[in-house]
């Protein structure tokens, strides 16, 4: 039977929280090394490709260099205190009125 969550005993076994995975690190290093060694070949193939293929490659590479923009929602707050209102409240002037 599985242990219930939050039983007060904390983590038992396994890696400590925040410890990097050695296999993942090694794979990333190997992939990086492969990409560096074959960069000139990639550039030559890219230059030889036709227009639509170049565009597809370009668009697929953008997320690796440019962060995605997150959408935000704005809802207008109707009972917003102005800075003057807050200062008056802090100084006690609003209570005197």
Image (tube, rainbow, N blue to C red):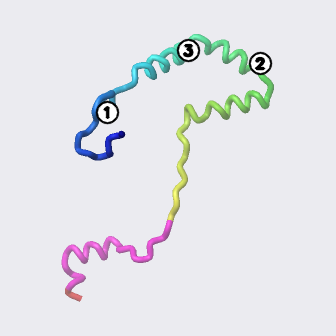
Residue 85 at x, y = what percent? 30, 76
Magenta stretch encompasses residue 88: yes
CA separation, marks 3 and 2? Answer: 20 Å
**Which label belongs to residue 36?**
3
- For disc 2, the marked residue is 48
Residue 57 at x, y = what percent? 69, 29
CA separation, marks 3 and 1? Answer: 32 Å
Q: Residue at x 64, y 13 (%)?
A: 40
Q: Residue at x 53, y 49 (%)?
A: 70
- Left or right for 38, reference 72: right
- Left or right for 73, reference 42: left
Choose the circle earlier in sequence order: 3 or 2. Answer: 3
- Residue farthest toward the bottom in the current orientation of the protein: 97
Q: Residues within 10 Å of mark 3 (few under 14, many from 20)?
A: few
Q: Quadrant of residue 55?
A: top right
Q: Residues within 10 Å of mark 1 (few under 14, many from 20)?
A: few
- Left or right for 13, reference 28: left
Q: Secondary structure at mark 3?
A: helix
Choose the circle earlier in sequence order: 3 or 1. Answer: 1
CA separation, marks 2 and 1? Answer: 47 Å
In the picture, which quadrant includes the N terminus? top left
Magenta stretch encompasses residue 10: no
Q: Depth check: give the residue in front, 44 or 14.
A: 14
Residue 94 at x, y = what percent? 24, 82
Q: In this picture, which residue range is highlighted in magenta? A: 75-95
In the picture, which quadrant includes the C terminus? bottom left
Q: Nearer the viewer, mark 3 or mark 1?
A: 1
- Residue farthest toward the top in the current orientation of the protein: 37
- For disc 1, the marked residue is 17
Q: Residues within 10 Å of mark 2 (few under 14, many from 20)?
A: few
- Left or right for 65, reference 3: right
Q: Secondary structure at mark 1?
A: loop
């Amino acid at each position: 039977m599985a242990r219930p969550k939050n039983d007060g005993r904390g983590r038992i076994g396994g890696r400590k929280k925040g410890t990097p995975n050695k296999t993942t690190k090694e794979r990333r290093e190997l992939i990086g090394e492969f990409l560096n060694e074959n960069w000139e070949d990639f550039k030559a193939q890219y230059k030889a490709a036709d227009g639509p293929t170049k565009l597809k490659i370009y668009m697929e590479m953008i997320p690796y260099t440019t962060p995605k923009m997150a959408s935000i929602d704005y809802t207008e707050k109707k009972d917003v205190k102005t800075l003057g209102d807050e200062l008056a409240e802090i100084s006690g002037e609003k209570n005197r009125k």
